[in-house]
């Protein structure tokens, strides 16, 4: 099995009926970029910068710059999508100034945290901008809940650029800016925000958690965590439809993007960019080469008629079994 996967290292990724699909890596540490390259990913689709903080504590701009520069260089000519700190929620560090919260997952996390501690956010943005001289960088903002919040984030981004310009520090001028679609609010109005961003990436881990009201790490309610739930499929469909209408890139970077069970659904909905743990890339390539996009579209049409997640998940199971 391993040997047959090894043969997939160099191949392009195309379905059996000729649809191109692009696979990217989710990384937390620079070391993982080696595996991403070995498995010939199209680049890094999600670089979780909060792990820099969780690992090294309250890092300086210079330290962040050095780490990100190395990441970009390791990635060669391929794009690196850097997500700004998704701190707070379950990703808390002792070193973070943080209030006690009753509901941290719905509290001061991700861009909410960054916007509250503006200097901290600017320091990170400056480090990212400086690294952009060494290869293609895209910047992505986590947990955006509405247009106003995204515009505030852009204002801070513009200030970070201005401060570098004033100091004569170089950075790439046309960096693409995008958002994580991981809150139901932004998924529902993805048609509006798609006009203002360069790209979107669907964070299904959180999107499912917040839409179904199920803690993604709670074993007692794990039985309700159903990616094929009609509400989730409706949102995934809304998002990709909005992206296509505006002609912007839209990937999926939640866990389901690398799960053989759910890849057919994503392809059937029209997603063509999947970002996953680099360890799952060869497995995904193997599957995609066997699938027909046409069959995946039929599966999705079938799923759209299901009124419960139970029925939908059964249909997914029988589709997977039919594929052998
Ligand atoms: C997600 O929410 O799907 C996601 C990719 O982000 P994280 O898992 O880091 O919250
Ligand atoms: Mg998330």
Image: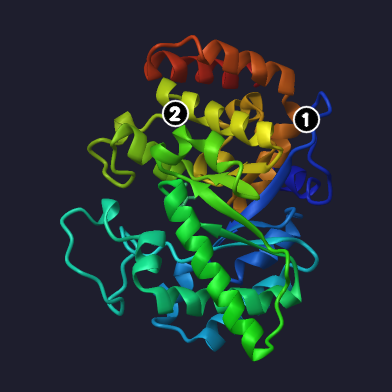
Q: Nearer the viewer, residue 119 or 31?
A: 119
Mark 1: few/some/many CA within 10 Å (<14, 14-19, 20+): many
Closer to us: 32 or 236: 236
| Disc number placed over residue 24 in the picture, else none | none
Quarter of the view holding residue 166: bottom right
Q: Tell me the residue at 46%/60% (across/down).
A: 152
The residue that mark 2 highlights is: 232
Q: Is residue 38 above or below residue 244?
A: below
Residue 168 at x, y = what percent?
69, 89
Q: Residue at x 70, y 77 (%)?
A: 171
Of residues 211 and 188, the one nearer the viewer is 188
Residue 29: tell me if it is visible. no
- Image position of 117 (left or right of 243): left
What whole-number distance in Å separates the C-alpha atoms at marks 2 and 1?
24 Å
From this view, report whether residue 30 is shown above or below residue 107: below
Q: Which residue is mark 1?
A: 15
The mark nearer the N terminus, 2 or 1, is 1
Percent coordinates x, y for residue 201 in the rendering: 57, 46
Residue occupying the point 78% across, 69% down: 76
């Amino acid at each position: 099995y391993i040997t047959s996967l090894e043969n997939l290292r160099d191949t392009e990724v195309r379905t059996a009926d000729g649809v191109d699909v692009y696979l990217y890596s989710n990384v937390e540490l620079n070391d993982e970029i080696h595996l991403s390259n070995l498995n010939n990913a199209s680049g890094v689709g999600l670089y979780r910068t909060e792990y820099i903080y969780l690992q090294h504590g309250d890092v300086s701009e210079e330290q962040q710059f050095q780490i990100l520069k190395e990441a970009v260089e390791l990635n060669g000519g391929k794009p690196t999508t850097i997500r700004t700190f998704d701190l707070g929620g379950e990703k808390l560090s002792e070193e973070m100034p943080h209030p006690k919260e009753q509901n941290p997952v719905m509290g001061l996390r991700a861009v909410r945290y960054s916007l509250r501690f503006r200097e901290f956010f600017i320091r990170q943005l400056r480090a990212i901008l400086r690294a952009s001289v060494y290869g293609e960088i895209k910047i992505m903002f986590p947990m955006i809940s509405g247009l106003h919040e995204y515009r505030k984030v852009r204002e801070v981004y513009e200030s970070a650029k201005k401060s570098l310009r004033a100091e004569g520090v170089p950075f790439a001028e046309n960096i693409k800016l995008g958002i994580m679609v991981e809150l139901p609010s932004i998924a529902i109005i993805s048609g509006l925000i798609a006009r203002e961003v360069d790209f979107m990436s669907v964070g299904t881990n959180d999107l499912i958690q917040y839409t179904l009201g199920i803690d993604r790490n709670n074993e007692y309610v794990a039985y309700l965590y159903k990616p094929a739930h009609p509400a989730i499929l409706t949102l995934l469909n809304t998002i990709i439809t909005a992206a296509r209408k505006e002609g912007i890139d839209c990937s999926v970077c939640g866990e389901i993007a690398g799960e053989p069970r759910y890849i057919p659904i994503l392809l059937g909905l029209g997603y063509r960019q999947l970002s996953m743990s680099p360890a799952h890339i060869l497995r995904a390539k193997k599957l995609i080469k066997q699938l027909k996009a046409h069959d995946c579209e039929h599966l999705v049409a079938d799923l759209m008629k299901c009124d419960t997640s139970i029925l939908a998940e059964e249909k997914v199971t029988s589709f997977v079994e039919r594929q052998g």
